[in-house]
Image (cartoon, rainbow, N blue to C red):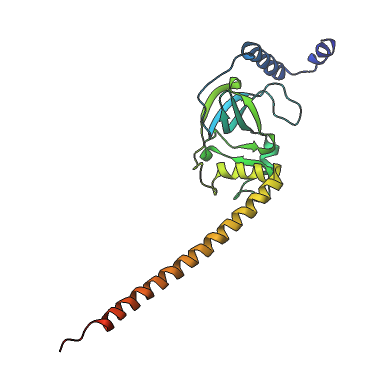
């Protein structure tokens, strides 16, 4: 407490307010188990609490990747201008950092901000402050934002598993192509057999005197 009292003098008014509000919410909700309705793809404002750098702290929007009962797995977002400048975007900045993904109002967020992909974490639903919207993209389409974020997370944080999955996917597609080729060859052979059978029936047909 002595160390804390000493540091308080160096805190700005805004940081003091964020710390106080976060502690008050934690005190009120620390033993609560929220079963609030949350869906994958939701955008929520949550209280991330007091975190260690470089984790995001206090109130931030998050994107929900998964949810289970009282918990949800989220990627937090920030409007930091320095991170926006470094963030990857397939059109605006294709050489940007993979762990920063630029997003905008067209994606369902209030304004331009950055998803901090390597800051993904499980948090309690009791940390929810308010709903903010939902992603505008198709959550099942691998070419769109939601699947891109999940694939990027797995690719970089679980690289060995990602590589195994990619190899299995390639092997599956190769087998599928071979199957399709054999299926077409079978159809052609079946047609030839049917034509030959028709010709044989004609040849075996008795000739009228």
| Residue found at the far bottom of this picture | 209
Name which residue lies at 62% across and 11% down: 28
Front position in the image: 107 or 168: 168
Q: Position of residue 114 (x, y in %)?
A: 63, 37
State the residue at coordinates (60%, 14%): 32
Vertical order, 146 against 127 (above or below): below
Q: Position of residue 106 (x, y in %)?
A: 51, 40
| Residue 145 placement (x, y as % from top left) | 56, 43
Residue pictured at 35% horizontal, 78% vertical = 196
Number of numbered discs overlaid on the protein picture: 0
The picture quadrant where one finds residue 128 is: top right
| Residue 173 in which image quadrant | bottom right
Q: Is residue 36 left or right of residue 50?
A: left
Q: Position of residue 132 (x, y in %)?
A: 52, 28
In the figure, 110 relative to 59: above or below? Answer: below
Decide which of 63, 170 is in the foreground and name it.
Answer: 170
Left or right, residue 12 beside residue 32 = right
Q: In which quadrant of the rendered image does the C terminus lie?
A: bottom left
| 87 horizontally vs 52: left or right | left
- Give the answer, above or below, for where 147 lies relative to 200: above
Residue drawn at x 20%, y 86% as measured from the top left: 207
What residue occupies the far left of the structure in this picture?
209
Kindly indicate the quadrant of the structure image that contains residue 104: top right
Q: Where, quadrant-wise, is the N terminus in this rendering?
A: top right
């Amino acid at each position: 407490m002595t160390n804390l009292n000493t540091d308080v003098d160096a805190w700005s008014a805004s940081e003091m307010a964020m710390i106080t509000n976060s502690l008050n919410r934690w005190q009120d909700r620390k033993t609560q188990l929220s079963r609030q309705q949350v869906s994958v793809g939701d955008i929520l404002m949550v209280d991330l609490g007091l975190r260690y750098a470089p984790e995001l702290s206090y109130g931030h929007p998050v994107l929900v990747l998964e949810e289970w009962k009282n918990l949800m797995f989220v990627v937090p977002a920030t409007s930091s201008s320095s991170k926006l400048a470094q963030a990857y975007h397939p059109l605006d900045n294709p050489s940007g950092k993979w762990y920063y993904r630029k997003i905008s109002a067209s994606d369902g967020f209030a304004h331009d901000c950055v998803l901090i992909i390597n800051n993904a974490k499980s948090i309690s639903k009791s940390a929810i402050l308010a709903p903010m919207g939902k992603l505008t993209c198709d959550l099942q389409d691998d070419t769109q934002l939601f699947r891109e974020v999940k694939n990027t997370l797995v690719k970089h944080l679980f690289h060995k598993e990602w590589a195994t999955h990619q190899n299995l996917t390639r092997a599956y597609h190769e087998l599928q192509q071979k199957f399709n080729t054999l299926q077409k060859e079978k159809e052609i052979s079946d047609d030839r057999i049917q034509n030959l059978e028709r010709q044989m029936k004609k040849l075996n047909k008795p000739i009228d005197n």
